[in-house]
Image (cartoon, rainbow, N blue to C red):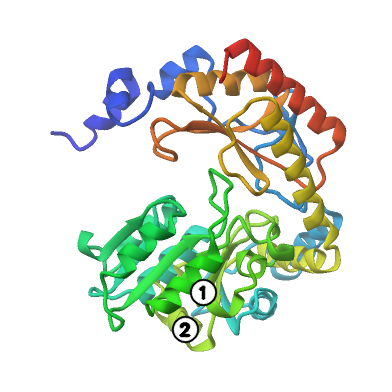
């Protein structure tokens, strides 16, 4: 069979798309007016965006602290371009290390309570590089069933890629987790990887229980705090939220959420970070984080530390929205963060719900399989510290009408 035949079938045959888990193919969804992806944004001011000359309230962004448009953050990026140009044109190993990178790594390590840190060019690369550098062929990786795709891809690229070396436990189920840990003796190399906040459901990993079990069974723990930094623990992440910083071996974070940039970092003991620095292929063989992105994170980090009220505000807004959405009768799962899913189930109806909100001036995201299980298609709403009461009122009114018009239970 022609290796590209699947591409032509996916493009032209809706029934073929269904065999891949899609309700239909993108062309058919576009013809129906319910295709929710790759929408070009013409202009953005954080909580609002312009699309097709229409202003929409944005409730689909990971800009939790509203820093992408902060004057200090913008100016930091501009000044960095003036000083260094637009890119580093090389790997950190060669000509790509700036003084700013080292300054950022030192500050990030201190911020999350670790000895050292290194910065990657993307969050995805951070997980790829860290896991593949650490795990050997006889080691076991134990992960929550709902961890981010970058963790799954990292495992598939690691030396522990055999099925026997990968164990999933039921989402946030500590009984399931311990039953897996019990299968391996204390001398067996074990890496547990978990999201601090899960990106689709917005629920929080029970980190206190996880760290207790990791210590009991002599397992190392890596926490992906991509959606926790800037939200939990005064902005410092899940380990601070649960007061168990000393029990976490590695903290991973990204810059594309609360830090208003792009990139990622891993923080831990200096010896472990030194190892990752020399064996993570996605670090060694990638161009370094650009000057503008680096300066943006430094400025955002400074604001987070001097304006803690931003973290408090986004959590207050999230609490209010969870209460309001439950009162309207929506299924929002176990969200405890500014990520609040509206679980609909049916894939077509979920896309229709997205379209209804879009037409009503509300921009949100759709999560369909494989991002979520087949029966749990949802609207992924998320909130920012600088959303106004007027904007949130408009969102709630649109959601109420959507529920009535589309008969969403």
Residue drawn at (34%, 30%), measured in percent from left and top?
21
Rendered view: 171 above or below 295: above
Rendered view: 5 above or below 110: above
Q: Is residue 253 left or right of residue 136?
A: right
Q: Is residue 392 left or right of residue 91?
A: right
**Quadrant in which the N terminus appears:** top left
Q: Residue furthest front?
A: 175
Point out residue 182 in the picture as x, y percentages from the top left corner.
30, 70
Residue linked to disc 2: 272
Residue drawn at (64%, 32%), measured in percent from left and top?
364
Look at the numbered disc 1 and give the secondary structure of its residue.
strand
Residue linked to disc 1: 250
Name the residue nearer the viewer: 91 or 373. Answer: 373
Q: Residue furthest left?
A: 1
Badge 1: residue crowd in 10 Å (few <14, some 14–19, many ≥20): many
Count every numbered label the image shows and give the total: 2
Point out residue 138 in the picture as x, y percentages from the top left corner.
23, 75
Badge 2: residue crowd in 10 Å (few <14, some 14–19, many ≥20): some
Picture quadrant of residue 334:
top right
Name the residue nearer the viewer: 126 or 222. Answer: 222
Name the residue nearer the viewer: 132 or 321. Answer: 321
Q: Is residue 74 left or right of residue 155?
A: right
Cα separation, mark 2 vs mark 1, equals: 9 Å
Picture quadrant of residue 230:
bottom right
Point out residue 388 in the picture as x, y percentages from the top left corner.
85, 38
Q: Residue furthest bottom?
A: 271
Rendered view: 163 above or below 335: below
**Quadrant in which the C terminus appears:** top right
The label shown at residue 67 is none
Q: Is residue 294 left or right of residue 219?
A: right
Look at the numbered disc 2 and give the secondary structure of its residue.
helix
Residues tagged 2 and 1 counted as in contact (Cβ below 8 A): yes
């Amino acid at each position: 069979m022609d290796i590209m035949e699947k591409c032509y079938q996916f493009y032209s045959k809706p029934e073929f798309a269904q065999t891949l888990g899609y309700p239909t193919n993108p062309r058919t969804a576009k013809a129906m007016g319910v295709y929710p992806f790759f929408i070009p944004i013409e202009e953005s001011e954080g909580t609002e965006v312009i699309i097709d000359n229409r202003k929409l309230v944005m409730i689909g962004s990971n800009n939790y602290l509203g820093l992408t448009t902060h004057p200090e953050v913008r100016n930091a990026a501009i000044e960095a371009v003036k000083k260094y140009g637009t890119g580093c044109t090389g790997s950190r190993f060669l000509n790509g290390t700036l003084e700013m990178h080292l300054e950022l790594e030192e500050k990030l390590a201190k911020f999350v309570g670790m000895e050292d840190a290194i910065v990657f060019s993307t969050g995805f690369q951070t997980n790829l590089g860290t896991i593949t550098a650490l795990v050997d062929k006889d080691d076991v990786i134990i992960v929550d069933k709902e961890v981010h795709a970058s963790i799954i891809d990292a495992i598939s690229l690691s030396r522990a890629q055999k099925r026997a070396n990968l164990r999933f436990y039921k989402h946030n189920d500590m009984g399931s987790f311990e039953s897996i840990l019990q299968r391996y003796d204390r001398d067996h190399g074990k890496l547990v990887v978990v999201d601090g906040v899960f990106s689709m459901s917005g629920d929080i990993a029970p980190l206190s229980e996880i760290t207790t079990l990791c210590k009991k069974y002599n397992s190392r723990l890596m926490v992906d705090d991509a959606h926790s930094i800037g939200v939990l623990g005064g902005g410092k992440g899940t380990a601070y939220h649960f007061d168990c910083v000393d029990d976490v071996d590695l903290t991973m974070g990204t810059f594309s959420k609360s830090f208003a940039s792009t990139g990622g970092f891993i923080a831990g003991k200096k010896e472990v970070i030194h190892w990752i620095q020399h064996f993570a292929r996605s670090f060694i063989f990638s161009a370094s984080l650009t000057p503008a992105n680096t300066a943006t994170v430094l400025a955002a980090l400074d604001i987070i530390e001097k304006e803690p009220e931003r973290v408090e505000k986004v959590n207050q807004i999230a609490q209010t929205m969870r209460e309001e959405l439950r009162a309207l009768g929506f299924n929002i799962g176990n969200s405890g963060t500014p990520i609040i899913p509206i679980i609909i189930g049916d894939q077509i109806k979920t896309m229709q719900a997205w379209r209804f909100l879009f037409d009503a001036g509300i921009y949100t995201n759709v999560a369909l399989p494989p991002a979520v299980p087949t029966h749990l298609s949802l609207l992924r709403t998320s909130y920012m510290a600088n959303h106004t009461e007027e904007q949130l009122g408009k969102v709630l009114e649109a959601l109420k009408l959507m529920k009535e018009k589309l008969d969403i239970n």
